[in-house]
Amino acid sequence: MTETRQKKNIYHLALSILEIGGLTRQQTHTLLMNAGLFYTGSLKSILEALEKRILNLTSENKELLRTMLDQDAKKRPTLKEILERIKASESSSKDIRKVIPQLEEKKISGPEQRNTRYNQMLTIWNK
Amino acid sequence: MLGKTSVGDSLTPKIKLNYSDFSRIEAGSENTVGYFTFQARSLINQEIHHIRAFNLSSHSVQQDKNQATTIFLQETLRLCSLQPDILILNSFEFYNNKICYAMKPITSPVSPSTPNLNISSILKGLLEDLKHLSHYGEIQMPTSNIYKINEELSISTKKNNEANGDDRRSHSLLYFVQDWNQVMSSTAIVIAGDS
């Protein structure tokens, strides 16, 4: 499979996702193809429109779609890289889900304890 | 009634014998769909199943019958890897180049513009299909070909998840691309139109 073909397919996969989110494939594609120097700005507007339609669109997924639609095909992620990024984003959100019940159980009262827990959560987020 | 068309002719004898009340549930053109999908009632247990019948009159078959058949079988195997018990194994039949099988009616098209879409799950499912389809060329997946499997996780899977501390809800949505031959045909048409 040539890299050029794979990168084209990744661009079209992102368009399919946008279409499921309610943005017409042909309109989005035409807008991006005619954007020229305004490509980055147009893409930003498209993803903001998607954010309004898909309520639980995470910042990681939005960034992933942005890279999949990058004007420079070489900068688009490979199929393997996309999968790795999804897994990483899922495992970090799983870690957070584990910490939150612990916080609730401990019934944190003092500001000192609260800061410790907050720092623990930040560490997990930043992993 | 299916009549004497390529649609009706696509069914194999065992499927005709064991099912009644056939109605086609996908609306694609007879020239472009890789297979026909029917809803039918099993005469053995009265259950409603979905029947897939390979379309021998499609453009894909006219162009390259071996490749079209290979892709149809690859898609079937991929579906079984997603949900192992989806296919009614005893219904699978090859007869005079016709291929048919029945499956549980647990797939449905993804509805566009649903506000609570799980983008990660959709991407994961479609990536796997795209990996296989990319071997055949440039692929553009129409939204109408994106489907989901929605069934409660099996008890063993639930137990495993609990043991691993996985707190996923008991419902799991799996996404896949339906009718790979049709997706390839429609992509070829779009590319020809663009150039």
Image (cartoon, coloured by chain):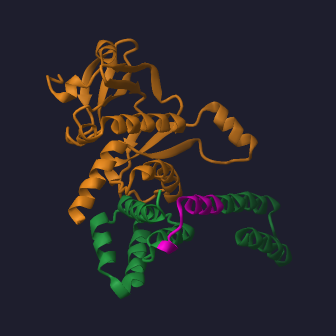
Chain colours: A green, B orange
Q: Does the magenta stretch include residue A114?
A: no
**Whether residue A24 can be seen here:** no
Report the magenta residues as a range: A74-89
* Image: B165 above or below B44: below
Residue at the image point whose x is 31% and y is 76% from the top: A33
Q: In this view, does B67 lie to the left or right of B27?
A: right
Q: In this view, does A61 lie to the left or right of B34?
A: right
* Image: B11 above or below B174: above
Q: Which of B180 and B176 is in front in this view?
A: B180
Name the quadrant containing residue B40.
top left
Q: Is the magenta stretch mostly helix, strand or loop?
A: helix
Q: Quadrant of the C terminus of chain B?
A: bottom left
- Residue B145 at x, y = what percent? 34, 48
Q: In this view, does B31 lie to the left or right of B183?
A: left
Residue at the image point whose x is 23% and y is 38% from the top: B62
- Residue B177 at x, y = what percent? 41, 46
* Image: B173 above or below B48: below
Point out the residue furthest to the bottom here.
Answer: A37
Residue at the image point whose x is 54% and y is 36% from the top: B81
* Image: B148 above or below B10: below
Residue at the image point whose x is 38% and y is 54% from the top: B137
**Whether residue B101 can be seen here:** yes
